[in-house]
Amino acid sequence: MEYFLQQLINGITLGSIYGLIAIGYTMVYGIIGMINFAHGDIFMIGAFMALISFLLVVSLGVTSVPLALMLVLFFSMLLTAAWGWTLERVAYRPLRASFRLAPLITAIGMSIVLQNFVQLTQDARVKPLPPVITGGHILTDTGTFSVSLSNIQIVIILTTTLLMAAFSFIIAKTSLGRQQRACEQDSTMAALLGVNVDRVISLTFVMGASLAAVAGLMYLLYYGVIDFFIGFVAGIKAFTAAVLGGIGSLPGAMLGGLIIGLIEVFWAGYFSTEYKDVAAFSILAIVLIFFPSGLLGKPEIEKV
Amino acid sequence: MTAPLLSVRGVDAFYGNIQALRSVNMDVAPGEIVTLIGANGAGKTTLMMTVCGKPQARHGQIVFDGTDITKLPTHEIARMSIAHAPEGRRIFPRMTVMENLQMGALLAPEAKFAEAQEMVFSLFPVLAKRRNQRGGTLSGGEQQMLAISRALMSWPRLLLLDEPSLGLAPLIVQQIFQVIRELNAKQGLTVFLVEQNAYHALKLAHRGYVMVNGKITLSGTGRELLARDEVKAAYLEGGR
Ligand SMILES: Nc1ncnc2c1ncn2[C@@H]1O[C@H](COP(=O)(O)OP(=O)(O)O)[C@@H](O)[C@H]1O
Ligand SMILES: [Mg+2]
């Protein structure tokens, strides 16, 4: 039981990170019907931007940990958002009127470009970050096994919950969110009503990239090391999460992220570490047989 | 005649290599109801969409209230206060009636939202009852009412209506035409109406144009066109 509880906590933590990345896939798919395969690498860039921001903040002499974290969060979101915006602007927008596969191929190309760029400029070795958020709480202790919830896990789960609530609110209740949903449902009609569709698409990339930056920061804090390749694996997991939850559905992306995180951790905890990825993808295949549009991907669901 | 609010001059439009409009000329004066009739596939919807920049005219000029809008992007044409209730209604299916109206009011001052909402709910009381229902679950007639209401939410100076009667029961058609007449008479709203239902449209409109294969072939007052033998033969027999 204690072991189960511990895995549950670890799974929710990992699932939160996947969920944050998955939202970027699902929002972009919702609005332009394209899988942004470079989104995993935007997450990777986000982790590097967070690392660079940390160095910057420390060199500026900020010693208070909460303040440093807030600054790092702000800078990495800002910088990564700029990457996301540029990616759409230079690589995807010119191809929007092209045949369906063109943007997909470009996305894969951009993914390779981003990986190689970071590998060249940051070199291929892993980059460590000393633990920033330390300590934790022992929840139960049976003598043989103790269940702990670390402070970093609390930070990750709280931040994710907060951000997801904020994003759900933006999509459901604000004018920007309505414009995004309108573009997703009928972009020509949205334009006829005065929506600047290009701008809304840009903002969607910016939002997705900001969330990926948060995920990158959380990953950096949680694992303490990053390299240019983390975006590939995490990206595929998050993409799987988005499809599992129903691509295009915001709650689906969150749910899918959570499920993939839990499957991965439980599989590794109870069976073997080696096949944890296979487990996640197998579950995806099984779910798609019974729910071809994902768990929450019904046509009447709120998309974007 | 006063200076036209909308003026279309020598407009050609294409879908790829296929020409859909051939040197179209037409005007809508402020306060007028002008109708465009023609057979299915004549190019009526294309003309309306070309006014909105989708597709853009390849040749010719479209002027709205003295401004050349030929090359403006669609969302900026909307900003000139041209509202469009397009063919097929194009209600956002997964948004509620209220959200569809909010989308319509995007360009209007927020302070005038309540007034606009009150106006459309009094024109179409059924929408008030459906306010929290999703657009996709409305009946065809209700969707058309919502499409017109959504267009009205922006307080337009020119309302473009593309076949509002299509597929609707005669009673609903009458209600919608009555609303158009009232908006024009009471608020002085300028309306450009595309219709296949030529009889009703010509009775309602001050002036009309007939389009055949992307060309304007006839124009005149509603009454004049109703009396023309070509119009009677092609669009009115059995078409009531
Ligand atoms: N999106 C499109 N792509 C290619 N051809 C089109 C498109 N829309 C309309 N057309 C063609 O343009 C012509 C005019 O169509 P349309 O403007 O819809 O006519 P109407 O509204 O009078 O029925 C038709 O021949 C139609 O097939
Ligand atoms: Mg038509």
Image (spheres, coloured by chain):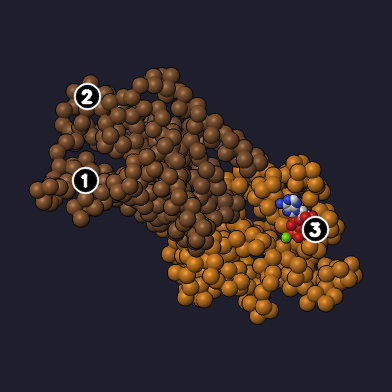
Chain colours: A brown, B orange
Q: Nearer the viewer, residue A212 or A200?
A: A212
Furthest residue toward left: A143
Q: What residue would you read off at disc 1? A: A154
Does residue A288 show up? yes
Does residue A195 show up? no
Residue A287 rendering spot, x and y as whole percentages? 46, 56
Give the amino acid type for the residue marked by disc 3 in the picture.
Ala
Give the amino acid type for the residue marked by disc 1 in the picture.
Ile
Say few, some or many: other residues with alpha carbon within 10 Å of mark 2 (under 14 / 14 to 19 / 20 or more): some
Residue B59 rendering spot, x and y as whole percentages? 76, 41
Circle 1 sits in a helix, a strand or a loop, which is it? helix
- Tell me if the residue at label 3 has its CB under 8 Å from ligand 1: yes
Q: Chain of mark 1?
A: A
Q: What residue would you read off at disc 3? A: B42
Q: Chain of mark 2?
A: A
Q: What residue would you read off at disc 2? A: A58
Residue B62 rendering spot, x and y as whole percentages? 70, 46
Among the 4 quarters of the image, the one containing residue A132: top left
Residue B237 rendering spot, x and y as whole percentages? 85, 75
Say few, some or many: other residues with alpha carbon within 10 Å of mark 1 (under 14 / 14 to 19 / 20 or more): some
